[in-house]
Amino acid sequence: MNGAQIPISQLADVKLLSGPGMIRDENGRLSGYVYVDVGGRDIGGYVNDAKQAVKEKVRLPVGYTLVWSGQYENMERVAEKLMIVLPIALFIIFLLMYFNTKSAAYTLIILLSLPFSAAGAMWLLYMLGYNLSIPVWVGLIAFLGVDAETSVFMLLYLDMAYDRRKAQGRMSAMADLREAILEGSVERLRPKFMTVAVDFIGLLPVMLATGAGADLTKRIAAPMIAGMFFSFALELFVYPAIYAIWKWHTDVKRQSALNPSSAAPGAKRGWPGLTSTAAAPRQALTRFNSYRDSLARILIEEKLPVEVLSVALVESGFNPLAISPKGARGVWQLMPDTAMRYGLTVAPGNDQRTHLEHATRAAARYLQDLYGLFGDWELALAAYNAGEGRVQRAIELAGARDFNELARRKLLPLETRNYVPAVLAAWSQMSLAQVANRNEAHAERE
């Protein structure tokens, strides 16, 4: 009150100490921050190692609490959500695949590809030095949907080839199954390659970007690019093997056991008969009954036995719109060069191979020429399937004009070795049917 000055040293002890730049509090408690800039490794791994080091070397006073926050806290929060979202995403993919295929086995085969493709994505992440992060998980989840979709198409092409050969009665041994799988895989090669190429071309600019946000988008695109390449290899090399094992044990093996003689090349008996659902589905028999009289009339006019209709039955099931991967078309499955050689027009919008009368006359003349060339119906049928040049070379190698000998020495393709017995079995049944019809007509006249 009297204006006297008092030194501050008498009131407090003043010292220079290191401390927080400002006083902060969280949840009603004083707090201090230690900032760490992590480089060269993932945040999760660094924090785990740091926690262990702090636990071993730092003793916190009573009342102190240590909390790891920042990006690590955000990552933990998102990881908890991913533990829910990822199983839900996989379950939705499973349901969509199951509703599409109506088969649990198909769905499991499709889902089997997902971990293998994801493993491929991990390899690229490792080579690029990317750590697991939220953008990487987003890219992986996006890729899994694309991978499942392309896998469905691979199985679809394999199934189409399998069903086509089965409908023609050419699915009785492992070799038949392999040829069907090879055919389906070849058909799928170009669409799959185009899919991978388009995805790669679309995502490559993202991987080369250097602007703002590039680090984030690169980590989304990287697993998608790598996953597509691994998916491409998986679908072309692994899927066919899995499909072969599955179909062999669930269908073909049982069919082979029921018809043990059907797989023997050159056998004239033992191929599934016309009444078998494998050789002659109901639709084929219905079409046969519809076209039989008109086609038989044409064959008689061309001076061929009516039983030649068995060729059309085995080739296409009497389907005028049937088309093969090799380009054959129509009831008689004529190749474009053969059709044009015998006077048919083969052009977009005007393909006479689908015209029953024109195609039948062309096929009849072709078969007549083959029979005149080889002097034997078995060799003529083999040439109709494999080409006359292929059969001529086989005859020259064997030194014999006998189909059974060529088949025994495997000088003809497996398809041809099974095709000829199939046609002959149908031929035999048609002959028996003709005899039965004549006897019935004779009995009615009497």
Image: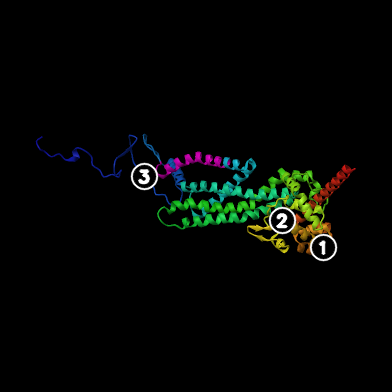
Gap between marks 1 and 3 measured at Cα: 96 Å
Q: Which residue is mark 3?
A: 34
Quarter holding residue 358: bottom right
Which numbered disc flags the more N-terminal residue, 1 or 2? Answer: 2
Q: Position of residue 198 (x, y in %)?
A: 53, 56
Q: Residue 333, labelled with which disc?
A: 2
Q: Which residues are magenta?
A: 68-94
Gap between marks 1 and 2 measured at Cα: 21 Å
Q: Are marks 1 and 3 in contact (CB under 8 Å)?
A: no
Please say whether residue 343 is visible from this viewpoint: yes
At label 3, the amino acid type is Val
Foreground mark, 3 or 2, reads: 2
Gap between marks 3 and 2 measured at Cα: 79 Å
State the predominant SS element of the stretch in magenta: helix
Q: Position of residue 165 (x, y in %)?
A: 72, 50
Q: Tag 2's secondary structure?
A: loop
Q: Position of residue 157 (x, y in %)?
A: 64, 50
Number of residue marks: 3
Q: Are marks 3 and 2 in contact (CB under 8 Å)?
A: no
At label 2, the amino acid type is Gln
Q: Which residue is mark 1?
A: 372
